Image: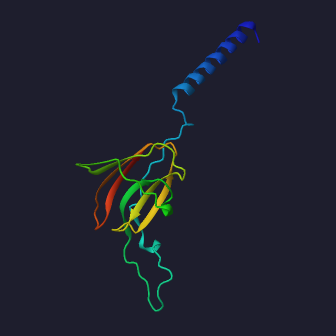
């Protein structure tokens, strides 16, 4: 290769490398994961509800799903009953807005509890990231008796 062609080649490779680096810097980083979207299931299907150890001679039947009734952060897994009290409550056009300040250390983890049935008879829960500092829960009446539509925003 001639000296001129060699220099042109080197410049071309350097330009391509510079463009690639610029594109990588300009592109959004894929290594930073977005926080998970938290949404309680709207209901627990009736086929998921099972009664065991019922009295002899009695037949069980579950005729409808259990609808979402409430949601709140907890200071522990649900079986430890670490329910938290909201720091504030306000009513607006969207419903009732509850704010929970959950910064600090939680030895048993930070959890989100979704409760079902008109008296919160069943709980589904998942652990929140330790870095979660606040949860805003907005609740408004749903379509069915005892059901609430709930929006969850934990950061």
Q: Is residue 112 left or right of residue 69?
A: right
The relative height of residue 52 versus residue 14 in the rendered view (above or below) is below
Where the C terminus falls, by quadrant?
A: top left
* Color style of the picture: rainbow
Expressed as whole percent of the image width and height from the top left, the position of residue 89 reads 29, 49
Expressed as whole percent of the image width and height from the top left, the position of residue 147 reads 31, 64
Q: Is residue 29 left or right of residue 154?
A: right
Expressed as whole percent of the image width and height from the top left, the position of residue 14 reads 65, 16
Expressed as whole percent of the image width and height from the top left, the position of residue 126 reads 49, 56
Q: Which residue appears at 36% of the width and 68% of the height?
A: 117
The relative height of residue 34 versus residue 59 in the rendered view (above or below) is above
Q: Is 64 or 112 nearer to us in this picture? A: 112
Residue 101, located in which quarter of the rendered image? Answer: top left
Q: Which residue appears at 54% of the width and 53% of the height?
A: 108
Where the N terminus falls, by quadrant?
A: top right
Q: Which residue appears at 47% of the width and 84% of the height?
A: 54
* Residue at the left extreme of this rendering: 93
Q: Is 115 or 67 nearer to us in this picture? A: 115
Residue 121, located in which quarter of the rendered image? Answer: bottom left
């Amino acid at each position: 290769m001639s000296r001129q062609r060699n220099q042109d080649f080197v410049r071309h490779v350097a330009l391509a490398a510079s463009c690639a680096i610029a594109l990588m810097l300009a592109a959004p980083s894929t290594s930073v994961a977005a926080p998970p979207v938290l949404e309680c299931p709207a209901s627990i299907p009736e086929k998921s509800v099972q009664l065991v150890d019922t009295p002899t001679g009695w037949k069980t039947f579950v005729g409808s799903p259990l609808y979402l009734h409430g949601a709140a952060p907890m200071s522990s897994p649900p079986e430890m009953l670490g329910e938290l009290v909201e720091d504030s409550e306000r009513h607006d056009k969207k419903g009732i807005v509850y704010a929970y300040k959950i910064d600090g250390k939680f030895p048993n983890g930070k959890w989100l509890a979704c409760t079902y049935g008109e008296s919160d008879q069943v709980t589904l829960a998942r652990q929140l990231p330790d870095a979660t500092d606040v949860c805003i829960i907005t609740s408004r009446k749903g379509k069915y008796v005892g059901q609430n539509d709930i929006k969850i925003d934990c950061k």
